[in-house]
Image: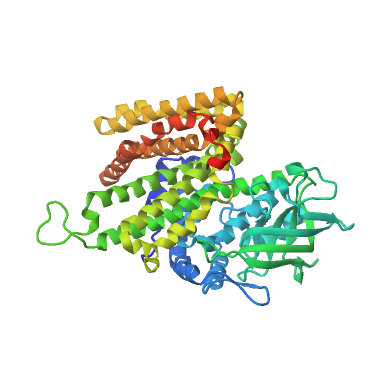
Amino acid sequence: MTNYTPPLSDLAFALEHVVGYRDVAQLPGFEHADFDTVVEVLAECGEFMAGVIAPTNRVGDLEGAQRQPDGTVKTPTGFKEAYKQFVDSGWSGVALSEEFGGGGFPRTVGLGIQEFMLASNMAFSLCPLLTHGAIDALMHYGSPEQKQRYLPKMISGEWTGTMNLTEPQAGSDVGALTTRAVPNGDGTYAITGQKIFITWGDHDVADQIVHLVLARTPGAPEGTRGISCFIVPKVMVNDDESLGERNGVETVSLEHKMGIHGSPTCVLAYENATGYLIGEENKGMRIMFVMMNSARLSVGMQGLAVADRAYQQSVQYAKDRIQGKAIGVTGRDSAIIEFPDVRRMLMTQKAYLAGLRRLLLLTAVHTDISTNSPDEATRVRSDEIVGLLTPIAKSFGTDLGNELTSLAVQIHGGMGFIEETGVAQHYRDIRIAAIYEGTNGIQAADLVGRKMPVRGGSSFLEFIASMREIEPLLAEAGDEFASIREELARQFTALEKATGWMLRTGMSDPNAVLAGSTPYQRMWGVVTAGWLLAKGALAASKLPNAERAADELAVARFYAEQLLPQSSGLLSAATAGARDLFALSEDKF
């Protein structure tokens, strides 16, 4: 197994030259987060994650989290000590509210920190990621008293948080949940029910867990309209903010999973547990979507981060593995990196990772603009772009996580199928990411069902038009950029055709639109990443660093010529409709 090296150079290049981070640093509230400071922070963070968190990855996979006979949960060797160092070092709150003890840095910086942390140990990192989702929900909907009681210690990492949505009979259909919340008469509620798949639902790295639980109050409307959200702490908090008695929540069992073994995925039973309503009754879905939307970009980052660590391991193995003779080599055997097909796989990993990193960072940049720009129109447009890009970032990121870690196994050959090399762990760990926080099919339905109708489709069409502004710039850049320009132009046109079909068909045949939503969503990811790689190549060509310029051009051109064409290949699937999907009766499957 290889060590982890944070890709600071590519991250910094993307921030400065592709996604416009310097504009973010000029926004009110972010003046302290200038580019040079951010690079220093990220460098220090990368060193910490690689040195402290990354070494826990393998032992976490081998040992896993364990439920003890007394019902408590023990994390793998080293997790508790690493988490304490994580909290003591202050990395938990860098991009969170200064009002409650955070560093107040932009979300974009927080996403960079998440990449380094997730690549170091995805299972470990899910704890702070879920905590951040709960923090976002409380920031938006918590009462002043709730914020003051819970946020400072959650932001510091001293306390952790969870999302409790799923129940045995209610998977993605949250409206089918049955957990009850009965008023106690003193402003609190008695919460009773069972939740499954609760990530880091119990553990030993912190003394308190702040569960955010969806439940129904008596007489609530059916379906999603009747869901409320409650704070249910694992341990009751006394008036002096010290911890008191254990609340009525127990860990029934831990799930035995394909991957992320170090992350305790719990079945939790609530029995008259004391809960505190967040916001108003029957507004739980709004709060849930705050948590989910925050998490979806982070889940897309999981795909990038784990795939990047697998790529680093692939490169090292390809350089070290001696086997056969490459064309033209005499007198010695060759490392497999000298063979064209291995180079193709490595370049596929490298190009996709670079494009995906830029896509995720661009989404975060627009998130920061949508919250901090002084201009209302700018905030509104960036919020639209965040809405458009979030399902793409989550789905494209996690699909690529699956595909690129699979390539890493392939590059290792038979050794990749052997657990001792460690590369199989990356493949197993990332497989869940395309499923949770809304399956990628649900992301596609959200893209075409909720995001596309914004302003009658103008939001989507305007974004495509903004991408097309690169075409004359590529033409001016010379013959070396010709194939990039030609292929991007073809794919922009294909994406416009698919979008036009979706808009024309949506009102009359929504089932047809849903049938093509997943390939359509993939088209967006492939094209947007290719556009951002081309932007990077153009920017690098104007810098004095000739080596960087050559590298960026080679990666952008490889992507344009060999990966980007798949987008137009998906056009037929995106616009085929639902006829043949339902042509066979159920008994024919």
Q: Residue furthest front?
A: 587
The image shows residue 156 at horizontal and vertical percentages of: 62, 62
Question: In this image, 1 relative to 124: left or right?
Answer: left
Q: Nearer the viewer, residue 561 or 277?
A: 561
Question: In this image, 563 relative to 266: left or right?
Answer: left
Residue name at image x 70 percent, y 52 percent = 138
Q: Is residue 172 above or below residue 561?
A: below
User: Which quadrant holds the N terminus?
Assistant: bottom left
Q: Nearer the viewer, residue 543 or 485?
A: 485
Q: Is residue 575 visible?
A: yes
Question: In this image, 497 relative to 457: left or right?
Answer: left
The image shows residue 231 at horizontal and vertical percentages of: 74, 57
Q: Is residue 376 above or below residue 122?
A: above
Q: Is residue 373 visible?
A: no
The image shows residue 324 at horizontal and vertical percentages of: 18, 59
Residue name at image x 43 percent, y 59 percent = 426
Residue name at image x 57 percent, y 51 percent = 436
Q: Residue furthest left?
A: 331
The image shows residue 212 at horizontal and vertical percentages of: 70, 56
Quarter of the image holding residue 489? Answer: top left
How many numbered discs sit on the rendered protein?
0
Q: Is residue 42 above or below residue 29?
A: below
Q: Nearer the viewer, residue 567 or 235?
A: 567
Q: Residue furthest right?
A: 185
